[in-house]
Image (spheres, rainbow, N blue to C red):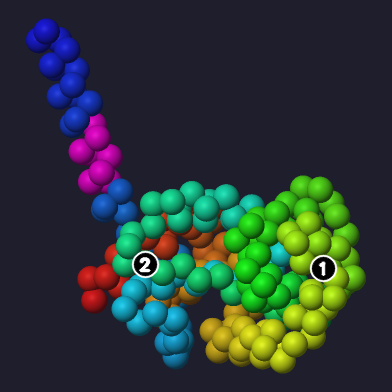
């Protein structure tokens, strides 16, 4: 009985030490993240925003996806997560339009991870409008509906806004994560994906304290 109680105390002490070490972890501006010269807008000013810039064809974005999904399961209530496609060239713009088409037609949640998987795991060639229309057919979107949305003014406008926002943050590539329109961190700064999510949590807490 005494030995069991002693082991329990040791376990509790170890957990406390681990918690303290996590809380004590700090990251440096200019090394692990940088501050945007001009803060960007956020969708919901009542919450702390984490915004991801990505491209479906990017292998690093694909590898980041499961870490983001895990992080989202325990995301605090005061944090808002937003995805936005990087559209820095013509091939990226194609996938960016597909993202906004899926969003406008209500199939984004079910198709987002699967489009990553189709490109990187299944090695499907999805590099033009016709091929993408075929992909979204599996989600109940017929070719005519897809093409109409793809060429619509609203989707084109959202792609332009995504491009303007990336330029405002002076992003040179993806994936990149922006915390509350102020702090920018990327894969080069973070070193690995687990550490990257800890940097995000640190920046969220930094903003929360302010």
Reading the image, the residue beneath label 1 is 142
Q: Residue 109: which quarter of the image?
A: bottom right
Residue 21: percent from left, percent from top: 27, 46
Element marked by disc 2? strand
Reading the image, the residue beneath label 2 is 79
Q: Residue 205: which quarter of the image?
A: bottom left
Q: Reading the chain from its start, which is encountered first: label 2 or label 1?
A: 2
> What's the magenta bit mostly, secondary-structure-wise?
helix
Answer whether residue 86 is visible to the viewer in this image: no
Q: Residue at x 72, y 91 (%)?
A: 153
Element marked by disc 1? loop
Q: Residue at x 52, y 64 (%)?
A: 189
Residue nearest the viewer, comparing 142 with 180: 142
Answer whether residue 21 is visible to the viewer in this image: yes
Residue 184: percent from left, percent from top: 48, 74
Magenta region includes residue 5 = no
Residue nearest the viewer, comparing 31 with 88: 88
Residue 87: percent from left, percent from top: 70, 79
Q: Residue at x 41, y 69 (%)?
A: 80
Magenta region includes residue 15 = yes
């Amino acid at each position: 009985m005494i030995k069991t109680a002693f082991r329990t105390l040791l376990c509790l002490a170890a957990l406390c030490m681990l918690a303290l070490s996590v809380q004590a972890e700090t990251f440096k501006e200019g090394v692990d993240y940088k501050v945007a010269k001009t803060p960007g807008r956020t969708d919901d000013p009542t919450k702390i925003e984490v915004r991801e810039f990505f491209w479906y064809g990017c292998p690093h974005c694909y590898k980041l996806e499961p870490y983001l999904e895990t992080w989202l399961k325990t995301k605090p209530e005061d944090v808002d997560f937003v995805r936005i496609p990087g559209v820095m060239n013509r091939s990226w713009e194609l996938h960016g339009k597909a993202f906004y088409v899926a969003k406008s037609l209500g199939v984004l949640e079910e198709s987002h991870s699967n489009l990553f998987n189709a490109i990187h795991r299944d090695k499907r060639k999805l590099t033009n409008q016709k091929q993408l229309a075929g992909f979204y057919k599996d989600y109940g979107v017929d070719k005519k509906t897809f093409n109409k949305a793809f060429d619509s003014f609203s989707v084109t406008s959202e792609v332009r806004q995504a491009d303007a926002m990336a330029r405002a943050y002076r992003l040179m590539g993806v994936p990149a994560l922006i915390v509350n329109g102020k702090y920018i961190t990327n894969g080069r700064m973070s070193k690995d994906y687990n550490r990257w999510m800890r940097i995000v949590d640190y920046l969220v807490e930094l903003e929360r304290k302010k």
